[in-house]
Image: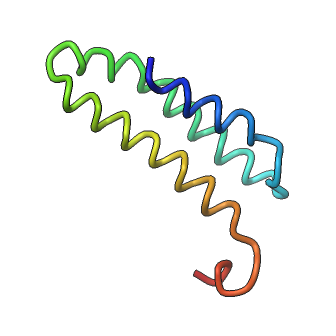
Amino acid sequence: MVLRPLLGVVESARGVGMHKPMSNDIMEHVLQVVELARPIVAAIERRDRDLASQVRRALSSVGLNAAEGLGTRSGNSRLR
């Protein structure tokens, strides 16, 4: 399924650069959401391929945005 690349990226970055235990907890929850959504996306895809693609992109965005937010550590980036 198309979600596997996202899982691979997040899993490979799981222990790298994340200094707080809360960061790991958040990423674990994001991974759980993505994993739980896989059968739902498959069911959607049987009826509407474009909608399934949109849901996949949204799930990828959640993981990427969470990782980006957890990675900001210094100066103005942290304040934002």
Rendered residue at 33%/23% (across/down): 41
**For the view shown, which residue lies furthest in the left direction?**
47
Q: How many numbered discs, if any?
A: 0
Using the rendered view, name the quadrant where residue 43 is placed.
Answer: top left
Q: Is residue 70 above or below residue 79?
A: above
Q: Is residue 79 above or below residue 54?
A: below
Question: Seen in the image, is 40 located left or right of residue 62?
Answer: left
Quarter of the figure with the C terminus: bottom right
Question: Seen in the image, is 45 located left or right of residue 3?
Answer: left
Quarter of the figure with the N terminus: top left
State the residue in front, 1 or 29.
1
Using the rendered view, name the quadrant where residue 54 is placed.
Answer: top left
Rendered residue at 63%/53% (across/down): 67
Question: Seen in the image, is 16 located left or right of residue 62?
Answer: right
Colour scheme in the image?
rainbow
Rendered residue at 60%/30% (across/down): 7
Q: Is residue 41 above or below residue 15?
A: above
- Return the x and y of residue 20 as percentages of the image width and height: 82, 57
Rendered residue at 20%/23% (across/down): 49
- Return the x and y of residue 10 as percentages of the image width and height: 65, 38
- Return the x and y of residue 37 as percentages of the image width and height: 41, 26
State the residue in front, 49 or 30.
49
- Return the x and y of residue 18 as percentages of the image width and height: 80, 54
